[in-house]
Image (cartoon, coloured by chain):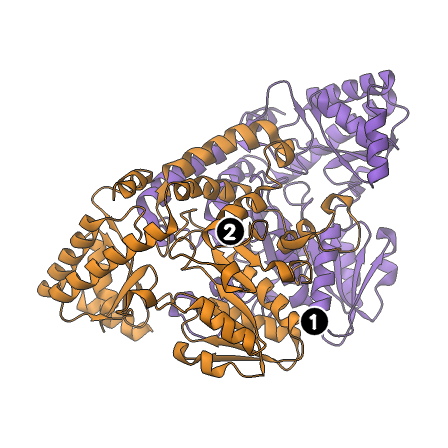
Chain colours: A purple, B orange
């Protein structure tokens, strides 16, 4: 597929490195470097305060939000960028709970990001009503959708195994049970085709520094379904979510639709990096990215299983149930991943025993997969990892 | 004062522009441009995910927080960067309320940022207990410190007039009355000498894009007094405030001290800009900056009052009661400021009638003050502002 040679050339990839960790931090798009440099010089430097209007900084969170919205199948005008994913989880969950005030359970699963569960914990403590966070196994979510569930809050793609929930099906089941849905798309946006509108998701949130390549600490996004957008009452009622931020009224009045999910001053420099990083998506079709991702993932599984019998596939074998990563389990996974990184093949480790590899066709090709599998075999065959590092770590955790 | 010629040379200032709006957005430090460019290329580009440790991204919010802490007189290890000022207000206020659970009034004043009041409104709605936000005139704060006040939440320097509260005195009065204090230092940090530790302030928050020159959307900071730091229970319980973010426990356990006030992934690129922007403060003493600021402010007042009799001083005449800005009132202030900006003298307008000028000695000198006063006189004498723009605006607001 020639297009992926073109997209690969748009990224800076360190020499002699095989990078399979784009599910944690995407690599630097040359366009992002150039855009930020120009933005700082020509906009911040020359326009100064007038940049808010002249350079469009004020509209940037919605303008860029719309481009992210296309990647997750959102209606135009219903996604906005800002803050961090944790903050957006808090906003979405608070709003969702308020839409379903007579119920008292937040249903989530043990495949969710712990950070999402932490934010829910804090919110529950704040709300000081009889709320329960019920965390079940991923396979048991559907059967737990009883008439006490106020909100079903899930991360679509499991950050450890890559196991992917069926968003359309679970959303339908949740709605049938009278629950509101909050989807975390951190490992979905730019990773797999997502259709929040078609799935009738109520809220969706995600980050941009993984598959969207916006750089460390890039802004998060939030989607609110059109049917809720003018109804929700923001918990984090910030001035940029106000109907008239520059009227400086002493009382809060929520802005129109998704604008009310803005909070404080947006991180203009980081959003500029994202805006440039999104250009690559204009060149590719998400379905083609997905097809290529599956090809590469199948290759990775085949090669690693053939070469490294001691590693156990931790991702679903069925590609339709798997996001854009492949994971293997090994008791000494931490030390093995350290050795792999020392050999310039970069994936990451997730406790307790997961070796995780992001499969990102925009800049990863067959040669990378083969290189990773070969290097992994060298390490496994030669037992080239540090057994003591493993023991040290085992004692700490 | 020669040192201010040196500091001025560290900023990019547009040609033929007199910039008196550093209280809204500081100008571009050359060091920030260079640092961000290098950080993107050498850290994000080359280190990728390993930058979190190798390049110190993980410690960056505390490391840079300590440098901001010096400027506000905080104890080392008690300031952390991240999020936006609105989010930090929410965190501080939630924590402050929890420290004083038997009382139910948040006392603030009409000189506070409306955005801080909005965040308080949202928080009160969330908490769903019998809380009241009581907003009084700035001069009436002390006399309202009764035994029902849970939290006194004030912005030290009024964003419109520059009127400055006596932080030490009001904090003492608040404590005597049994209240916890939350200080917003958005117009104080880098503007006036601040001593949060000596004043025994409980919580302080602020932003970095004004007097600290970190660029549009730069990160906010939060200070928690050592006596509270291990006690407060974060409302926004994010994974980077967790005791062990990478243990991926399913339950939240607050991190040590100020670390628990971190929420999500920090905006590494924006903090890098701030980190470089802070270098200028190593060259100057805050008291010298203050002395110079008062000299320039007095000059501005004298010159404008002599040249423009139709403008009324809206800032306190007594320099000890004034922050790092000078404001004038005029019914047609909006149109006058537009004309001034068209003449390349940049201040800003704040409703309903305030022309606001930031006095920032790091890059503003006497020649700028004289240029501004002369230009203002030209506009006032010639009535060079757009009367219709004024009428249009009057109709809209």
Q: Which mark is residue B269?
A: none
Is B359 placed above or below B390 here? above
Residue A356 vs residue A334, the one in the foreground: A334
For image coordinates 54% across by 48% down, the residue present is: B65
The quarter of the image holding the C terminus of chain B is bottom left
Task: Give coordinates of residue B132: x percent, y percent.
Answer: 57, 81
The nearer-to-camera label among 2 and 1 is: 2
Residue B96 is left or right of residue A355, and the answer is left
Q: Chain of mark 1?
A: A
Q: Which residue carries the number 2 mark?
A: B69
Is A268 placed above or below B377 here? above
Say which quarter of the image contains residue A229: bottom right
Residue A195 vs residue B388, the one in the foreground: B388
Q: CA distance from mark 2 to mark 1?
A: 32 Å
Residue B40 is left or right of residue A176, and the answer is left
For label 1, the crowd category at 10 Å Cα-Cα, with few meaning under 14, some 14 to 19 and many 20 or more, is some
């Amino acid at each position: 597929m020639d297009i992926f040679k073109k997209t690969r050339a748009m990224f800076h990839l360190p020499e002699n490195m095989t990078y399979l960790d784009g599910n944690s931090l995407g690599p630097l798009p040359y366009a992002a470097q150039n855009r930020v440099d120009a933005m700082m010089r020509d906009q911040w430097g020359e326009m100064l305060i007038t940049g808010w209007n002249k350079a469009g900084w004020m509209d940037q969170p919605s303008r860029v939000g719309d481009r992210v919205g296309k990647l997750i199948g959102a209606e135009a005008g219903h996604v906005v960028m800002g803050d961090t994913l944790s903050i957006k989880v808090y906003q979405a969950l608070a709003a969702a709970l308020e839409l379903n005030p007579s119920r008292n359970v937040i249903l989530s699963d043990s495949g969710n990001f712990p950070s999402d569960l932490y934010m829910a914990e804090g919110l529950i403590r704040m709300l000081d009503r009889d709320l329960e966070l019920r965390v079940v196994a991923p396979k048991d979510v559907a059967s737990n959708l009883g008439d006490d569930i106020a909100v079903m809050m899930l991360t679509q793609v499991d950050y450890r195994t890559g196991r992917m929930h069926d968003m359309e099906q679970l959303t339908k089941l949740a709605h049938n049970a009278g629950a509101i849905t909050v989807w975390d798309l951190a490992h979905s946006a730019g990773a797999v085709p997502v259709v929040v509108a078609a799935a009738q998701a109520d809220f969706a949130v995600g980050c941009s520094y993984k598959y969207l390549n916006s750089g460390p600490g890039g802004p998060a996004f939030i989607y609110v379904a059109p049917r809720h957008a003018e109804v929700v009452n923001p918990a984090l009622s910030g001035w940029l979510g106000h109907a008239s931020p520059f009227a400086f009224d002493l009382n809060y009045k929520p802005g129109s639709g998704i604008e009310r999910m803005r909070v404080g001053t947006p991180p203009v420099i980081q959003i500029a990096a994202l805006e440039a990083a999104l250009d690559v998506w204009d060149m590719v079709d998400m379905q083609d990215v997905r097809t290529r991702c599956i090809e590469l993932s199948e290759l990775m599984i085949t090669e690693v299983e053939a070469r490294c019998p001691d590693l156990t596939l931790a991702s679903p074998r069925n590609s339709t149930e798997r996001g854009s990563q492949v994971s293997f389990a090994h008791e000494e996974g931490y030390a093995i991943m350290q050795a792999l990184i020392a050999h310039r093949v970069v994936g990451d480790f997730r406790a307790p025993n997961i070796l995780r590899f992001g499969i990102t066709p925009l800049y990863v090709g067959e040669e990378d997969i083969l290189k990773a599998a070969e290097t992994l075999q060298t390490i496994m065959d030669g037992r080239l990892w540090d057994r003591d590092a493993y023991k040290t770590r085992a004692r700490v955790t």
